[in-house]
Image (cartoon, rainbow, N blue to C red):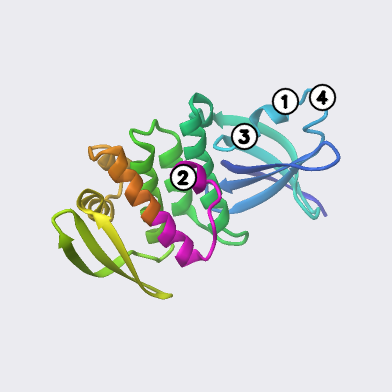
Amino acid sequence: MNKTLNIEGIIYKVIKSTNNSITFCVLSSLGEKYTILSKGSTKGYSKKNLFLEIGNKVNVEIVEGYTVPVLKSIALKTECELGKTSLEGFYYLSFICEVTGRIIFEGQEEILIYILLEEIIYQTPKDIFLELNYFLIRLMQLLGHELHFFSDLLIDKDKVQLNFSLPEGTIEKFLSITPYKVLKYLQNADSIYLVKKLKPSKNANKELFILLVQLFETVFQLKIKSALFLQE
């Protein structure tokens, strides 16, 4: 028997399907992943289609009992402006949504990841690399992958050698002094507002971002496609 379910959550993936339909993914406010089919959303004018954008917080009513739950109604709660204001904002939002989609699975409850997602996409970034660094570090902490470096060796006055202890073994990386200090600060930051108090250069934040993406991809054994646009 089909049953109706109401969900509040954030859209993090949208895929145009065949037969004038759209499949989209929502992380609910309870931290649960839902893949939903919106029928007829690409045929002519559809009110449903207006709200089916990554980053939007929505209330959806779905009908279960099909291979993929079917959307019955949708209402917009919070519109995410990040992807519309600049190309940089679009890359920022795309990266966050791609990473979220790669590490959550249906049947799990990841309420703290939902809180993190909500915290980081409904505010204006001061520096996209600084705040993406916070996002990656916090996300790894929530998933049980605290970045432990069991030694940090000062190579010269400008560079530090870090030896990270990961499940895959020891990984040796190098960082300049400023991004190294930012890394240590972010490991203890529990709010995006604490992060905004930092004032390192964009180059320092980008250097740390490249390192964190490498570590994240190593730990979770995946490639983050949207990171390539940010690293150019």
In the image, residue 9 lies at what x, y percent? Answer: 56, 42
Q: Is residue 5 left or right of residue 223?
A: right
In-front residue for pair 105/164: 164
Query: Mark 1 or 3, which is nearer the eye?
Result: 3
For the magenta stretch, what is the residue range? 212-232
Q: CA gap, disc 2 to disc 1? A: 25 Å
Amino acid type of disc 2?
Answer: Leu
Say if 183 sits above or below 196 in the image. Answer: below
Amino acid type of disc 4?
Answer: Gly
Say if 104 sits above or below 126 in the image. Answer: below
**Predominant SS of the magenta segment:** helix
Q: CA gap, disc 2 to disc 3? A: 15 Å
Q: Is residue 166 left or right of residue 157?
A: right
In the image, residue 109 lies at what x, y percent? Answer: 53, 58
Crowdedness near tag 3: few (<14), some (14–19) or many (≥20) residues, C-alpha within 10 Å: some
Q: The residue tagged with tag 1: helix, strand or loop?
A: helix
Q: CA gap, disc 1 to disc 3? A: 12 Å
Residue shown at 21% from the left, 57% from the top: 159
For marks 3 and 4 on the same chain, the one whose residue lies earlier in the sequence: 4
Q: CA gap, disc 3 to disc 4? A: 17 Å
Crowdedness near tag 4: few (<14), some (14–19) or many (≥20) residues, C-alpha within 10 Å: few
In-front residue for pair 163/67: 163
In-front residue for pair 7/138: 138
Q: Quadrant of the N terminus?
A: bottom right
Disc number for residue 53: 3
